[in-house]
Image (tube, rainbow, N blue to C red):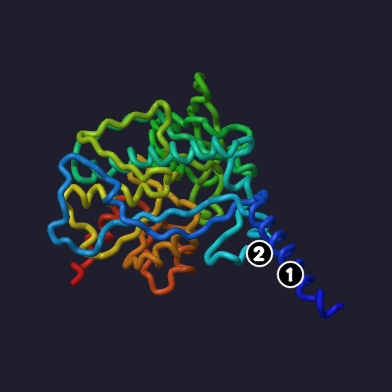
């Protein structure tokens, strides 16, 4: 009798195992998972007045690369090697405290819209076109809890002046601070809500460069309510539901290409990096997944923000060439040195 019912017991065990796996896969955990996504050309999503087709009809182009971000299931949390190139990330690293999933999604789409506007301004300025940009200060994104600005500056503060000099963009703020020696004080004029405040913060040495002064804050390249950009030509970029600011560099480079300048020289150029209005390229997240996505697309060259982003990309690049850039003009210079692909 035991031999007769053994197949039935195996079938029941198989059904129970399948149900358990299905349950673990369908129930979300408290963490997120980052997955690679193949790099895609920017050109099909860009519309601008005066756009010129590529006269050479080459196979090159400017590509952006995104990261698929979703709630990890219990199964993915327990066995995070299920997907090639995946990374588990705590919820606190994805969403701000108290921020709902819907609020986070709206914020990501808003950042994408702003990155497109900033990219258009930076690209047209690089081409010598007149772009009107107005900004009243540099936005503070975060404050190091163990730094000299802790308790004095807060996220969403707008630094209007440093030592009496205007700081409309992050580069201006940085430039004024590094004029000091570590340990010297800096005088800040800060807009907090509707009020202007004057603060003094003593600088400290940058852990990575002891001769460089910092005040322990992280700045935000996004456009504030007091910022305004007026473009000389209408430019529209529509990536649908793709969110976040990290495609800014790719957008800007593609706009230059669309305006009739062959900057890819027949190569497949993948770029990632958030653009500030002054043309600075700042670090972004998900470089492991973006590097894998660039490789899957057969990229000839991967432009990434200098620093930790470059180190991360090179860990996963294999034979793909990774080039660090600090600014939009530097990215243009790198591409200008490429020989025409034959």
Q: Which residue is drawn at 40% across and 56% down?
A: 65
First-in-chain label (2 vs 1): 1
Residue 123 visible, this orientation = yes
Q: Residue at x 47, y 31 (%)?
A: 159
Residue 278 visible, this orientation = no
Q: Residue at x 32, y 48 (%)?
A: 251
51 or 134, nearer to the observer: 51
Q: Which residue is drawn at 59% across and 48% down?
A: 93
Q: State the residue lying farthest toward the left.
A: 55
Rounded to the nearest angstrom, the CA distance separating label 2 from label 1 is: 25 Å
Q: SS of the residue at dot 2?
A: loop
Badge 1: residue crowd in 10 Å (few <14, some 14–19, many ≥20): few
Where does the image place residue 304, in percent across and percent down from the top left?
Answer: 39, 58
256 or 1, nearer to the observer: 1
Where does the image place residue 171, in percent across and percent down from the top left?
Answer: 39, 42
Examine the rendered structure and indicate whether residue 329 appears above or below residue 290: above
Q: How many marks?
A: 2
Examine the rendered structure and indicate whether residue 203 appears above or below residue 36: above
Where does the image place residue 289, in percent across and percent down from the top left?
Answer: 48, 60
Residue 69 appears left or right of 263: right
User: Which quadrant of the figure has residue 216?
Assistant: top right
142 or 288, nearer to the observer: 288
Residue where numbered disc 2 is placed: 79
Residue where numbered disc 1 is placed: 11
Q: SS of the residue at dot 1?
A: helix
User: Which quadrant of the figure has residue 51?
Assistant: top left
């Amino acid at each position: 009798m035991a031999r007769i019912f053994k197949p039935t017991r195996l079938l029941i065990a198989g059904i129970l195992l399948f149900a358990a796996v299905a349950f673990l896969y369908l129930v979300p955990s408290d963490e997120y998972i980052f997955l690679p996504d193949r790099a895609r050309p920017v050109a099909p999503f860009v519309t601008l007045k005066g756009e010129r087709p590529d006269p050479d009809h080459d196979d090159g182009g400017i590509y952006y690369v995104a990261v698929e971000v979703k709630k990890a299931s219990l199964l993915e949390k327990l066995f995070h090697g299920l997907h090639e190139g995946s990374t588990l990330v705590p919820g606190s690293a994805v969403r701000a405290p108290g921020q709902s999933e819907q609020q986070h999604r709206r914020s990501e789409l808003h950042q994408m819209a702003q990155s497109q506007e900033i990219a258009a301004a930076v690209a047209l300025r690089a081409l010598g076109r007149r772009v009107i940009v107005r900004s009243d200060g540099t936005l503070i994104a975060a404050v190091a809890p163990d730094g000299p600005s802790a308790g004095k500056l807060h996220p969403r503060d707008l630094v209007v002046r440093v030592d009496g000099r205007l700081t409309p963009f992050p580069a201006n703020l940085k430039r004024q601070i590094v004029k000091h020696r570590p340990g010297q004080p800096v005088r800040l004029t800060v807009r907090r809500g509707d009020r202007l405040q004057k603060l003094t913060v003593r600088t400290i040495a940058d852990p990575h460069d002891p001769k460089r002064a910092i005040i322990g804050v992280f700045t935000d390249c996004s456009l504030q309510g007091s910022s305004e950009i007026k473009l000389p030509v209408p430019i529209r970029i529509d990536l649908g539901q793709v969110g976040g600011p990290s495609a800014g560099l790719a957008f800007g480079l593609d706009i230059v290409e669309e305006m009739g300048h062959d900057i890819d020289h027949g190569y497949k150029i993948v770029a990632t990096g958030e653009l500030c209005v002054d043309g600075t390229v700042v670090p972004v997240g998900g470089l492991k997944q973006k590097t894998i996505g660039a490789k899957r697309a057969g990229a000839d060259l991967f432009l990434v923000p200098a620093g930790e982003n470059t180190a991360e990309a090179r860990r996963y690049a294999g034979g793909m060439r990774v080039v660090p850039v600090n600014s939009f003009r530097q990215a243009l210079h790198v591409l200008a040195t490429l020989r025409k692909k034959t």
